[in-house]
Image (cartoon, rainbow, N blue to C red):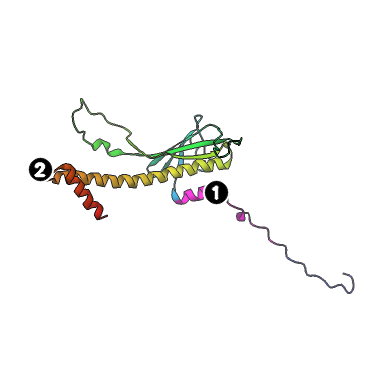
Amino acid sequence: MRPGRIPIPSQPRKARRARTDRPAQPLDKTLAALARACPGLRQVAPHTIGAPLADVQLTPQLTARFTWASYEVQVTVGHEDHLDRDDLESTVLYREIRAHAALLVPQTLDVDGIGHVEWEMTNSRAEMAFPTAFAVAVADQQDPRFAAAVLATVAKALAYARLATEHAGAQAEQAADEVRWESERPAGVSQHKWLRGKRAQRDATT
């Protein structure tokens, strides 16, 4: 150090920003949301042992199947197409994704038929189907955004299933009310008038 020069203390280097500070990518966000909304969701077809959920795979027919709880979700992916209807001059290609959930109904064997048939037949795989969820994904199946879109559409289909299940439960209760009211209808009273009055009473208490 030269005489008369005031030493300048060295400044500590700024720590590099941790990689965890980077903005979450679409697939990361989708996986985190799925972990909260559908814990245990897994792909069952096509399936590779040990493959993570993020590694979405499709059959040659562009289909996939997922399971969660007792629900099964069937996914169908469309071919590349110009799906941006807001920009007719766009040359970007996308794929349409469809997903619908189904729920196996095992109690159908306990249901007795009503009326005459030549003989009864059983349904070995009776399912309750739910509304189909639709979405658009990037065309490149290797792009992480494609996997994110598939998984997000699966989650949407499961949300539809839960919503429809609640609705079906309420409708089943109302149907049971109708049967009970009919059994209580006094002789000589119009069925239409009787049920209309009972419905009004129920609606007034809800």
- In the image, taking residue 101 as reference, residue 8 lies left or right, namely right
Q: What distance separates the C-alpha of mark 2 from that of mark 1?
A: 66 Å
* Label at residue 28: 1
The magenta span reads 14-36
Q: Residue at x 33, y 47 (%)?
A: 166
Q: Choose between 179 and 103: the one closer to the eye.
A: 179
Based on the displayed image, in which of its 4 quarters is residue 118 positioned? top left
The residue furthest right is 3
Residue holding disc 2: 188
Q: Quadrant of the N terminus?
A: bottom right
Report which quarter residue 3 is drawn in: bottom right
Q: Give the amino acid type for the residue marked by disc 2 in the picture.
A: Gly
Category of crowding for the residue at label 2, using alpha-carbon neighbours closer than 10 angstroms: few (below 14), some (14–19), many (at least 20): few
Please provide percent x and percent y for residue 99.
Answer: 45, 38
Q: Which mark is residue 140?
A: none
- Asked whether residue 180 is in view, the answer is no
> How packed is label 1: few (under 14 Cα within 10 Å), some, or many (20 or more)?
some
Of helix, strand and loop, which one carries label 2? loop
Q: Quadrant of residue 104?
A: top left
Q: Amino acid at mark 1?
A: Asp
Please tell me which of labels 2 and 1 falls first in the chain.
1
Residue 60 rendering spot, x and y as whole percentages: 51, 29
Q: Position of residue 134 (x, y in %)?
A: 46, 39
